[in-house]
Image (cartoon, rainbow, N blue to C red):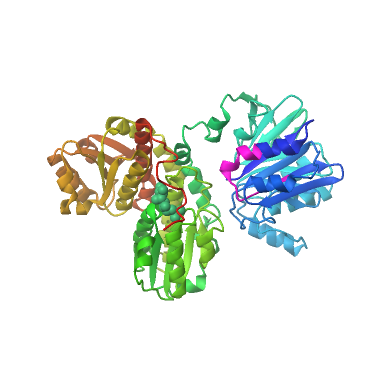
Amino acid sequence: MCGIVGYVGPRVAAPILLEGLRRLEYRGYDSAGLAIQATNGLEVVRSVGKLDNLSRALEGRSLLGTVGIGHTRWATHGRPSEPNAHPLVSGDVAVVHNGIIENHVALRRRLEAEGVVFKSDTDSEILAHLVHRALERGASLFEAVKATLGFLQGTYGIAVLAGRQPDRIVVAKNASPLVIGLGEGETLCGSDIPALLGHTRQMLFLEDGELAELTTGGARVETLEGQLVSRAPRRIDWSPTQAEKSGFKHFMLKEIFEQPRAVEDTLRGRIRVAAGEIEGAELGLDPAFIDNIDRVYFLACGTSYHATIAGRYWIEQLARLPAQTEIASEVRLRSPVFTPRDLVVAVSQSGETVDTLAAVRTAREAGAYVLAIANVVDSMIPRASNGALYTHAGPEIGVASTKCFTTQLVALLLLAIHLGRRRGVLDASSTASALEALMAVPSLMRRSLERSDEAYEVARRWHNARHMLFLGRGLGYPIALEGALKLKEISYAHAEGYAAGEMKHGPIALIDDEMPVVVVMPHDRHYEKTLANVQEVRARDGRVIAVVSESDQVASTLAEQVLRIPDAPELVQPLLSVIPLQLLAYYFADLKGTDVDQPRNLAKVVTVE
Ligand code: M6R
């Protein structure tokens, strides 16, 4: 999730690029840069931090070129730093890239062996070197980019400049978006529509496996196989604000719908499909340490804490290691016992939560090995840890965490499978089936999202309710907690999440004919027991809303309303059952008219105790 913008035309490019980047800052903001064609070659300016730093770096420089590319970065490979900022350069070639090049390590080794010197830690720099080498062999920029793409595995949206053909930009796309804007005597490109809206509304959407050459005369599009593509541009009437949210009403809703893509990015490059193995090096964990682990100890707050409850269950089940999870703010108050044989896993989307950070420091002081699971690369918690496993969900703008939660779940499940395999608990075939289940998640999530109208109907029925109870067992328990937290955070309704087995120990007293009770109960080993809870709620006139598997025949007839998720192996069900609950919270809050993206009293990053 980074932002790309490019311009070819009669006007001075730098201010147009800067304005485009400003409109894309919601996609990433840890560093930014521009490359402009100047009379004496390429001018490249990059800076760390928000775009204002780049503006300041440009002050006093007269960049008058009329062709250029720009980028705002959300780090994935390589920390936010000036050398890792885009555009990345090799000779007279400058490249901006969104996406992840999965085989970058192998490609880099090959080029280094041939004497190429890399200046960044990014996966993207490989592109600049490969294009440059092809140009040196006499290819045109277009052919050089096409040849480079042939070497790549992974995802990309790219824009490329070369000093030797200064009147054009070559762009290409595979899985990361790339839009071309057709103006009068000028052509633009961007990773997203908002970057272009100030200049044109005629947009040409590149498809996967296509590349295009942009000049003042427009765009020539070809497939990688060399077939000319003729596609009519579409007129986009969105306002810039609508466009930032890709047409969704709120960032939260956009982020809920981004989850299949986010999960794909968390998995990308981390699974060796043919071997049915996890790429251990990608998990930020020292292999020598794994065999000596005595216990896995999770630390987190809020939604991230809920993810760790599932993490704990997975570690116990798949790696057969003792595991516990603790609310980080509580750990700080106690005298926790950590040992050097503890694997402490600190989970935090922001990587900055002060309580989690303090608990990490306590664990490290006691000699424990700390692995951070975070979304923000090089944030405080990963820096304070021994290793980091990044979720690559892209920036999350809505205060209520959604895609960061599901990608945390994926990271935790990967970790559990990896530990289980490495420690000999899982054999090759059970590893392969766990990975298969995981890899099917994005498409199952898409199917889940297609049922958003069911969540809307439940929200419509209940959005005036003042209380709601959420119940679940096993892996359904953290999802019940998360469903309740989502609802209370953004709708301000009182919601409680409970382990279904605890219902009789207190919450049952709350149940009457005005109490909606959401029961998370896809087909799993606890189904019959949870069904008994449904009967108990009904016997007290409670109103049951059941999250069930698509093929469910029983609970669905007992519940007043149902939220269906696709049938899936138990291991990955939490990744699906949370979706209708996120949607329920969203629609509920929206119908009430609260500020969904910035709910009262809450902050996206909690840096105070
Ligand atoms: O950045 P973190 O994951 O460490 O944040 C922890 C909590 O503050 C966070 O999950 C909070 O509960 C969210 N608002 C949940 O939507």
**Residue 236 in the image: x percent, y percent?**
59, 25
Image quarter in which the N terminus is found: top right
- Residue extending farthest to the right is 40
**Residue 215 in the image: x percent, y percent?**
77, 32
- The residue depicted at 36 percent of the width and 45 percent of the height is 578
- The residue depicted at 33 percent of the width and 40 percent of the height is 492
Q: In the figure, is residue 140 to the left or right of 418?
A: right
- State the extent of the magenta-drawn residues as a range: 20-34
Does residue 209 show up? no
- The residue depicted at 49 percent of the width and 53 percent of the height is 350
Q: Is residue 57 magenta?
A: no
Does residue 138 show up? yes
- Residue situated in front as seen by the camera: 454 or 195: 195
Q: How many marks?
A: 0
- Residue situated in front as seen by the camera: 516 or 429: 516
- Residue situated in front as seen by the camera: 287 or 83: 83
Image quarter in which the C terminus is found: bottom left
Q: In the figure, is residue 29 to the left or right of 45?
A: left
Which quadrant of the view contains residue 120?
bottom right
**Residue 511 in the image: x percent, y percent?**
17, 42
Which quadrant of the view contains residue 171?
top right
